[in-house]
Amino acid sequence: MSTIKAIESKIARVEGFRVKVLYETGKDVRSDRASLPGYPYERMLKNSANVRDWIETRFKVTYPGFDVLVLDEGGRRVHGRTKLSTVRDTYLAD
């Protein structure tokens, strides 16, 4: 079982962007909260998918009862229709 901090770190490594895990009510989840399954994916979702696709097909399936914010390099929330390639590119910009 994993902590929220470990899950957020693995998502960043695999998917190429940072996230913030929340309760469905929008409240922040403590990073040391444990007893959650680890992030099971080893390969990033395709660049042509959008943020909403990733949330619905990967995050919500793995972590029901939780919500997530996808963040750009500056720590700003990314809109659901944004392509994952666009989000990932913000981490590469100089």
Image (cartoon, rainbow, N blue to C red):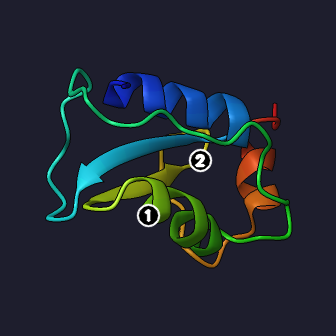
Identified at 68% across, 28% down, the residue is: 13
- The image position of residue 51, as x and y in percent, is 61, 67
Q: Identify the mark nearer the N-term, 2 or 1.
A: 1
- The part of the image, by quadrant, that contains residue 74 is top right
Q: Is residue 7 left or right of residue 27?
A: right
Q: Which residue is mark 2?
A: 72
Specify few, some or many for label 2: CA neighbours under 10 Å numbering under 14, 14-19, or 20 or more: some
Q: Is residue 28 left or right of residue 50?
A: left
The numbered dot on residue 60 is 1
**As shown in the figure, which amino acid type bears the numbered disc 2?**
Asp
- The part of the image, by quadrant, that contains residue 73 is top right
**As shown in the figure, which amino acid type bears the numbered disc 1?**
Lys
Residue 16 visible in the displayed image = no
- The part of the image, by quadrant, that contains residue 68 is bottom left
Specify few, some or many for label 1: CA neighbours under 10 Å numbering under 14, 14-19, or 20 or more: some
Where's the N terminus, which quadrant?
Answer: top left
- The image position of residue 48, as x and y in percent, is 85, 69
